[in-house]
């Protein structure tokens, strides 16, 4: 619910930002920006500071507009101003409240109004919210920058080689590469990682993926080869797919996104095959359709969802070939609804595809269990945060079997927040129009009922 309100607020803010967007800056404008800067202090805050002067009248209103450069979301802050010909003011953005992951590039600008009616908008500036607490080494190749601070150049070489292999595989598989840069922050311990995540993050989260921001945050200790070869290709798969599909109206079914990601891991989750076999025998496989937008909250069911998703992607790849995988990506990118896309590309419905895959699984040895298990999700699952928030894995050495990384933002909200401003604005306009229409209808019907328009 908090997400929903945040999003509504965001829409209103974007709307307000557009509506109040001032006239173009004029040459020799009376208002001059003398200094403007943003000082990051990860993970606590970013301080924005401005000093400006007007030769025409007192400056009496200043707004700060800022947001992550990559996802076009804008927030607007009306700053308290003591009117005067020259003003100096600052705004502290509490990033424990408004979280940004390390490496987020933020664009900001100021809108300054004076008492004579002049408005000046400053040039957009950018600041990268880097985590400056660690002595990072960094290397860039194929549009991926990796940051790490333990393990020296040997570990850096390993990381870059893993990135290179992953991008090569993904290009062959999906026919796509990263058009926009991606940053990967590799923390050496879970403790260090957690200090960089939102303060209310779940204890056992092992990383986070933000495809809309081009950022991956993970904990991989230097020399943990298996973890590196599991996490890096998995998370890069999400990033490549997200960039290939990027379309406000397009949507990838979750089983396709996670299935590809798990399939791409170099370190294969060995328990997955057994998990699927057992679920098939016990007649409790999850219908493919149910894996489109959410995975179940129950950890066992969530792991089964990842396992089935991987199997389905591999089934499509083995039965129909890589070209069809790419055709599916193209269809999703063109905003074709999932059922239609599958029908178009594979020539069968989602249910038929599911049935075809099930034929490859062991026959159930008994009747379906009471429908208490697989399908059940908490009643409020749509307002819940995602199942296993990002690189979900139990702490190293924990007794639990490892879970797969999952980095899905709440689907609807993530989608809404990734919309370009014009789309959000249009949506807001449509909502307003519908509201007015409804209100009008109710009013008319009401008037009619009480007989206002009856002719005498
Ligand atoms: Zn994932």
Image (cartoon, rainbow, N blue to C red):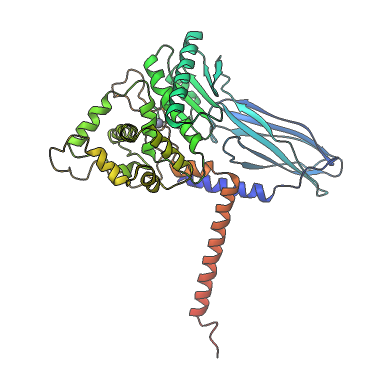
- 337 left or right of 135 in image: left
Examine the rendering and report whether any part of residue 374 can be seen: no
- 307 left or right of 246 in image: left
Relative depth, front residue between 173 and 418: 173
Percent position of residue 330, x then y: 46, 40
Q: Residue at x 44, y 42 (%)?
A: 331
Relative depth, front residue between 362 and 82: 362
**On the rendered image, what quadrant is the C terminus found in?**
bottom right
Q: Residue at x 52, y 19 (%)?
A: 146
Vertical comparison of 334 with 101: above or below: below
Percent position of residue 78, x then y: 67, 43
- 444 left or right of 369 in image: right
Percent position of residue 247, x then y: 51, 42
Q: Residue furthest bottom?
A: 456
Percent position of residue 210, x then y: 49, 32
The number of numbered badges drawn on the structure is 0
Q: Quadrant of ligand 1?
A: top left
Vertical comparison of 296 with 215: above or below: below
- 24 left or right of 407 in image: right
Examine the rendering and report whether any part of residue 124 can be seen: yes
């Amino acid at each position: 619910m908090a997400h929903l309100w945040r999003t509504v607020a965001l829409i209103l803010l974007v709307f307000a930002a557009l509506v109040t967007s001032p006239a173009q800056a004029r040459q020799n404008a009376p208002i001059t920006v003398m200094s403007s800067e943003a000082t990051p202090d990860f993970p606590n805050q970013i301080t924005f500071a401005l000093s400006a002067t007007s030769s025409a009248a007192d400056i009496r209103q200043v707004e700060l507009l800022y947001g992550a450069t990559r996802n076009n979301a804008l927030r607007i802050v009306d700053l308290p101003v003591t009117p005067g010909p020259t003003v100096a003011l600052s705004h502290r953005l509490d990033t424990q409240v408004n979280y940004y992951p390390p490496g987020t590039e933020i664009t900001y600008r100021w809108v300054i109004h004076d008492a004579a009616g002049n408005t000046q908008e400053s040039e957009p500036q950018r600041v990268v919210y880097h985590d400056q607490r660690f002595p990072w080494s960094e290397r860039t190749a194929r549009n991926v920058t990796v940051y790490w601070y333990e393990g020296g150049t040997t570990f850096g070489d390993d990381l870059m080689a893993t990135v290179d292999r992953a991008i090569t595989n993904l290009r062959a598989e999906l026919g796509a590469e990263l058009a926009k840069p991606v940053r990967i922050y590799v923390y050496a311990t879970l403790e260090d990682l957690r200090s960089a995540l939102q303060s209310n993050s779940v204890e056992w989260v092992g990383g986070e993926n933000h495809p809309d921001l081009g950022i991956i945050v993970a904990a991989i200790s230097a020399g943990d080869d298996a973890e590196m070869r599991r996490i890096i290709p998995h998370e890069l798969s999400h990033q490549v797919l997200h960039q290939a599909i990027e379309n406000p109206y397009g949507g990838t079914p979750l089983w396709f996104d996670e299935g590809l990601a798990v399939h791409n891991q170099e370190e294969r989750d060995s328990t997955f095959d057994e998990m699927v076999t057992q679920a098939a025998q016990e007649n409790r496989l999850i219908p493919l359709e149910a894996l489109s937008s959410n995975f179940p909250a129950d950890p066992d069911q969530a792991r089964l969802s990842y396992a089935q998703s991987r199997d389905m992607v591999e089934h499509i790849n083995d039965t129909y070939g890589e070209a069809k995988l790419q055709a599916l990506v193209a269809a999703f990118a063109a905003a074709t609804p999932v059922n239609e896309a599958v029908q178009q590309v594979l020539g069968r419905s989602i249910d038929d595809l599911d049935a075809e895959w099930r034929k490859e699984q062991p026959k159930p040895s008994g009747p379906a269990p009471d429908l208490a298990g697989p399908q059940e999700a908490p009643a409020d699952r749509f307002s819940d945060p995602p199942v296993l928030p990002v690189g979900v894995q139990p702490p190293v050495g924990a007794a639990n079997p490892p879970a797969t990384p999952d980095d899905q933002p709440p689907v609807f909200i993530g989608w809404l927040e990734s919309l370009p401003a014009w789309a959000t604005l249009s949506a807001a306009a449509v909502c307003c129009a519908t509201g007015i229409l409804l209100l009008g209808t109710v009013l008319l019907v009401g008037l009619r009922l009480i007989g206002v328009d009856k002719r005498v």
